[in-house]
Amino acid sequence: MKLDEVTITKAIVERYFERLMDNLDIDVAIVGGGPSGLVAGYFLAKAGHRVALYERKLSVGGGMWGGGMLFNEIVVQEDARHLLDEFGVRTVPYKEPGYYTASSVESVSTITSKAVKAGLSVFNCVSAEDVVVKDDKISGLVINWTATSLAGLHVDPLSVRSRFVVDATGHDTEVVAMLEKKAPGKLSTPTGSIEGEKFMNPEEAERLTLENTREVFPGLYVTGMACNATFGGPRMGPIFGGMLLSGERVAHLILKELSR
Ligand code: 48F
């Protein structure tokens, strides 16, 4: 068989555009491919919904690759271990009871693989730059190539329609910040605005991440570190149970809405 460069090009362009076209009107748009966004995408896609995840960087995984300070091991607590079991990520009990470690590389690659095979459509190198709000409810996302903004090019974005949007952008809680900029004081936080992340406190932070995994504006949910930044919880450092559990929780909250 002779290989032809134009056939290769056509195959890539056609397949990508088919997938893009299939994801212009979807059930859930997730912004951010860190642990919470990937886990949310897995459960939503597994339930049969049309879910796309937009990740600014070339690779998904967010803050999980680097473990703690580039030591590429993560810690999960007992309560969250069932999630790593669900994905087939191997865990090793630490000598103190209730703590487990896992390879951050195995965690990111395995969770990503399972999520994509469950039907999650990942668009990497794509950034959310705004939200679409109609009748006081989120109804979509405004997206652009990350390379466009990195190059400082003045290029208009495109839009996708989505029944629900999940902010899984981590510490910067970027989607919530976009909304707040244009609709100040409208968030379901104590002040109506982003409360801001607090000092490191793993115990409190893990609890609050889960408690604050919820809808912050009609149609917009937060998961992972974005919960702590939005609702004013502390940071927790390189323990990842809360991120995984938050991704599972946001998926279940949205599944409940989608089944209505
Ligand atoms: O930061 P990140 O891993 O979020 P997370 O799921 O997990 C947090 C932990 O990694 C760690 C921690 C707890 O253990 O403290 O930090 O809450 O992943 C967020 C992802 O969102 C992408 C960003 O590149 C990263 O991969 N992202 C951020 N803003 C945008 C975005 C945007 N506007 N559009 C697309 N992707």
Image (cartoon, rainbow, N blue to C red):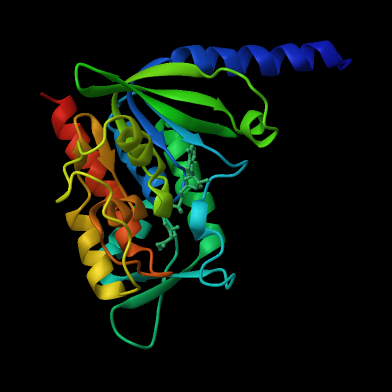
Q: Position of residue 154 (x, y in %)?
A: 64, 22
Quarter of the image where one finds residue 79: bottom left
Q: In this view, does 260 lie to the left or right of 148?
A: left
Residue that protrudes farthest toward the right in the picture: 2
Q: Is residue 94 visible?
A: yes
Q: How many marks?
A: 0
- Residue drawn 38% across and 63% down? 240
- Above or below, 257 against 243 in this view is above
- Residue drawn 31% across and 71% down? 77
- Residue drawn 45% across and 49% down? 111
Q: Can residue 124 be seen in this view?
A: no
Q: In this view, does 231 lie to the left or right of 18?
A: left
Closer to the camera in the image, 254 or 1: 254
- Above or below, 9 against 94 in this view is above
Q: Position of residue 119 (x, y in %)?
A: 42, 29
Q: Where is residue 182 in the image (x, y as percent from the top left)?
A: 33, 30
The N terminus - image quarter: top right
Q: Where is residue 75 in the image (x, y as percent from the top left)?
A: 41, 71
The C terminus - image quarter: top left
Residue that protrudes farthest toward the bottom in the picture: 95
Closer to the camera in the image, 15 or 239: 239
